Image: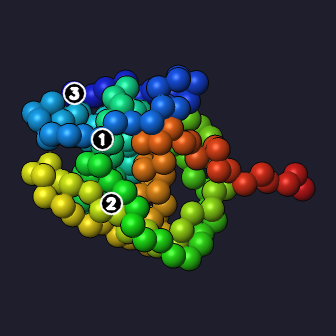
Amino acid sequence: MAKRNIRLSTEEILRKKCKEVKNITPNVITLLEDMAETMYASNGVGLAAPQVGVLKRVVIIDIGEGLVELINPEIIETSGSNIDYEGCLSIPGTSALVERPEYAKAKAFNRNGQEIFVEGNDLMARAICHEIDHLDGVLYIDKAIPEENE
């Protein structure tokens, strides 16, 4: 495993759409492991492959309940609405209010090529949506709700 450099929001790669993973190769497994090491070293709760410079549909999430690895994830169900502050390892030192579903369910493949379903409320739902957005070149700042000055 190796810690990789996290790409910043000014880098064009974060605005590109990622390619589907056709085969889960040793390189994909290494990517998952490197992403986990990078995320934990940066105190993040999620990381998408383009954030480490790889245009593949791969994300990891750990909201404190254990590592979740998602290959080719897609959101299949959402409900409710929740507005909360959100940040991103690619935009250090900032946060903004973003509206996300209160509940989200995604299907994906795990590192063994098995189809899995991941669902969650609140922070997990937010993380699922945030990380999958990265795979389509969308950053949370694109969805930020302008705050009024008091």
Instruction: Pinpoint residue 103: horizontal percent, then vertical percent.
Output: 46, 73
**Mark 1, residue position:** 20
Report the Cα–Cα distance between label 2 and label 3: 21 Å
Q: Can the viewer see residue 127 in this picture? A: yes
Residues 17 and 33: in front is 17
Instruction: Tell which residue pokes out farthest to the right in this image.
Output: 150
Instruction: Pinpoint residue 72: horizontal percent, then vertical percent.
Output: 29, 49
Instruction: Tell which residue pokes out farthest to the bottom in this image.
Output: 80
* 101 vs 10: above or below: below
Which quadrant does the C terminus fall into? bottom right
Q: Can the viewer see residue 67 in this picture? A: no
Instruction: Describe the element under mark 3 as helix, strand or loop.
Output: loop
What colour scheme was applied to this rendering of the protein?
rainbow
Residues 50 and 115: in front is 115
Q: Horizontally, is 48 left or right of 35 in the view?
A: right
Q: Which residue is painted at 37% across and 57% down in the image?
A: 74
**Mark 2, residue position:** 64
Q: Horizontally, is 38 left or right of 30 in the view?
A: right
Q: Which residue is painted at 39% across and 36% down in the image?
A: 18
